[in-house]
Image (spheres, helix red, strand yellow):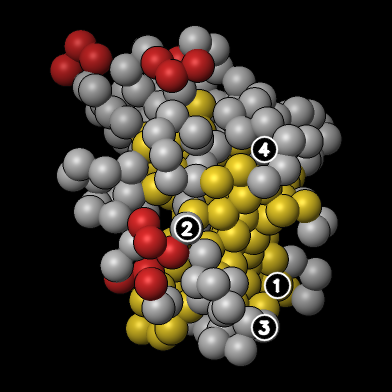
């Protein structure tokens, strides 16, 4: 899901925690939650950060693997596995993340949970983000290496389609953006988009408890997704 066309000084949301199936070490499944055997050597969902200022061309890195993100809290381990994990028809767990721009110094801060500051991306890292963002995106992404010539069976989210709903499909909820006056406001116009809806899909909505939300994900390879 995404919003665009405005001036955004941050974003917030709660992300349902799952451990999706990943087919091989050269693929990953992320939703601001990233499962990558290539980087970590296991399939646990992990808390990660990333930055780039040239659309992944030459700059940026994950976590603390290069200079960039400045960690200010040693109680939060960046790159650590997240638990507990949600289960199909079982308990559902999520984490809440907030990114916001400090209006005084221009740094972009990361907050985890309820008021726990993890660290910041210094303002000098960026050019376009020096003032504000013009788009905010939430959602999932996988790498498809097409093993054996077919679509990968790497899952996104819970590995189930959005239409299955709560307890079965993964979700983002309480999606908000930060305005010019440093206030959190509901998303002005959430759009939902699935690049390959026969493999992974998305359904958005709004209610009084979850605010703006969407369910998303899927199993990957199937009869509908060859």
Locate residue 201, reporting x and y percent. 43, 49
Q: What element carries label 3?
A: loop
**In this rendering, is residue 27 above or below 176?**
above
Q: How far apart are marks 4 and 3 (CA)?
A: 27 Å
Locate residue 69, reporting x and y percent. 50, 46
Q: How far apart are marks 1 and 4 (CA)?
A: 19 Å
**Residue at 20% from the left image edge and 11% from the top image edge:** 148
Residue furthest bottom in the image: 181
Q: Do the residues labelled 4 and 3 touch (CB within 8 Å)?
A: no
Locate residue 101, reporting x and y percent. 55, 70
Q: Do the residues labelled 2 and 3 touch (CB within 8 Å)?
A: no
**In this rendering, is residue 185 above or below 162?**
below
Q: Is residue 121 left or right of residue 26?
A: right
Q: In this view, does 60 lie to the left or right of 140?
A: left
* Res. 17 mark: 4
Q: Name the residue under label 1.
A: 211
Q: Distance between the residues labelled 2 and 3?
A: 21 Å
Q: What element carries label 1?
A: strand
Asked if residue 31 can be seen in this view, the reply is no
Q: Mark 3 points at which residue?
A: 183
Q: How far apart are marks 1 and 3 (CA)?
A: 16 Å
- Residue neighbourhood size for the residue with mark 3, other residues' Cα within 10 Å, grouped as few (<14), some (14–19), many (≥20): few
Q: Which of marks 4 and 1 precedes in the sequence?
A: 4
**In this rendering, is residue 20 above or below 47?**
above
Q: Which callout, 2 or 3, points to the residue nearer the camera?
A: 2
**Which quadrant would residue 13 be assigned to in this image?**
bottom right
Locate residue 20, reporting x and y percent. 55, 27
């Amino acid at each position: 899901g995404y919003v665009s066309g405005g001036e955004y000084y941050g974003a917030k949301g709660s992300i349902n925690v799952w451990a999706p199936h990943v087919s091989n070490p050269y693929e990953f499944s992320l939703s601001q939650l990233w499962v990558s055997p290539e980087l970590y050597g296991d399939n646990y969902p992990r808390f990660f950060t990333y930055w780039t200022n040239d659309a992944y061309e030459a700059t940026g890195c994950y976590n603390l693997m290069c200079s960039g993100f400045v960690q200010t809290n040693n109680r939060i381990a960046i790159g650590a596995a997240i638990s507990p994990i949600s289960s199909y028809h079982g308990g559902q767990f999520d984490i809440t993340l907030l990114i916001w721009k400090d209006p005084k110094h221009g740094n972009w801060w990361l907050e985890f949970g309820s008021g726990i500051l993890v660290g910041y991306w210094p303002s000098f890292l960026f050019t376009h983000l020096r003032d504000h963002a013009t788009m905010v995106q939430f959602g999932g992404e996988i790498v498809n290496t097409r093993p054996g010539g077919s679509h990968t069976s790497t899952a996104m989210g819970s590995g189930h389609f959005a239409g299955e709903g709560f307890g079965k499909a993964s979700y983002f909820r309480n999606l908000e953006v930060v305005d010019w006056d440093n206030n959190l406001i509901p998303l002005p116009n959430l759009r939902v988009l699935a690049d390959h809806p026969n493999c992974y899909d998305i359904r958005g909505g709004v209610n009084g408890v979850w605010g703006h939300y969407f369910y998303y994900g899927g199993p990957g390879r199937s009869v509908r997704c060859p």
